[in-house]
């Protein structure tokens, strides 16, 4: 099964991008290239509307990668 992401509405594409960023941050923590404090500073510098989603996704990916 394949999906053409170009056909998704703009908002869904943006949610996918945010999810990708959160997974990358968790990967950086796992590899020791960043700290949780640095990631949270980055999240808090984003618009308020995005912060909760980014925190949830980041913590979810981090828990998955550490188990």
Image (cartoon, rainbow, N blue to C red):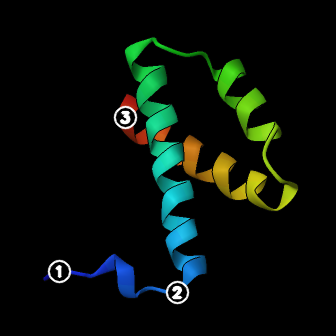
Q: Is residue 39 left or right of residue 17?
A: right
| Quadrant containing the N terminus in the rendered view | bottom left
Give the labeled residue for mark 2.
9
Tell me which residue sits at (38%, 16%) in the image: 31
Q: Is residue 42 left or right of residue 62?
A: right
Among the two numbered marks 2 and 3 on one chain, the one whose residue lies closer to the N terminus? 2
Among the two numbered marks 1 and 3 on one chain, the one whose residue lies closer to the N terminus? 1
Mark 2 to mark 3: distance in Å?
Answer: 30 Å
Give the labeled residue for mark 3.
65
Question: Compared with residue 53, is residue 26 higher up or lower down, i.e. above or below?
Answer: above
Q: Is residue 49 left or right of residue 19?
A: right
Question: Compared with residue 62, is residue 55 higher up or lower down, i.e. above or below?
Answer: below
Q: Which secondary structure lies at badge 2?
A: loop
Q: Position of residue 22 (x, y in %)?
A: 53, 45
Give the crowd class for mark 2: few <14, some 14-19, many >=20 residues within 10 Å. few
Q: Which secondary structure lies at badge 3?
A: helix
Among the two numbered marks 1 and 2 on one chain, the one whose residue lies closer to the N terminus? 1
| Residue 67 in view, yes or no | no
Give the crowd class for mark 1: few <14, some 14-19, many >=20 residues within 10 Å. few
Q: Nearer the viewer, mark 1 or mark 2?
A: 2
Question: Compared with residue 39, is residue 50 higher up or lower down, i.e. above or below?
Answer: below
| Quadrant containing the C terminus in the rendered view | top left
As drawn, which residue projects farthest toward the right?
A: 48
Instruction: Find residue 39 and report its image quarter.
Output: top right
Give the labeled residue for mark 1.
2
Q: Which of the pair 30/63 is nearer the observer?
A: 30
Q: Position of residue 54 (x, y in %)?
A: 65, 50
């Amino acid at each position: 099964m394949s999906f053409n992401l170009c056909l998704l509405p703009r908002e869904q594409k943006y949610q996918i991008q945010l999810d990708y960023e959160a997974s990358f941050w968790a990967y950086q923590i796992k590899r020791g290239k960043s700290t949780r404090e640095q990631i949270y500073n980055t999240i808090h510098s984003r618009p308020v509307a995005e912060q909760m989603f980014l925190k949830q996704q980041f913590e979810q990916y981090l828990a998955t990668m550490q188990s």
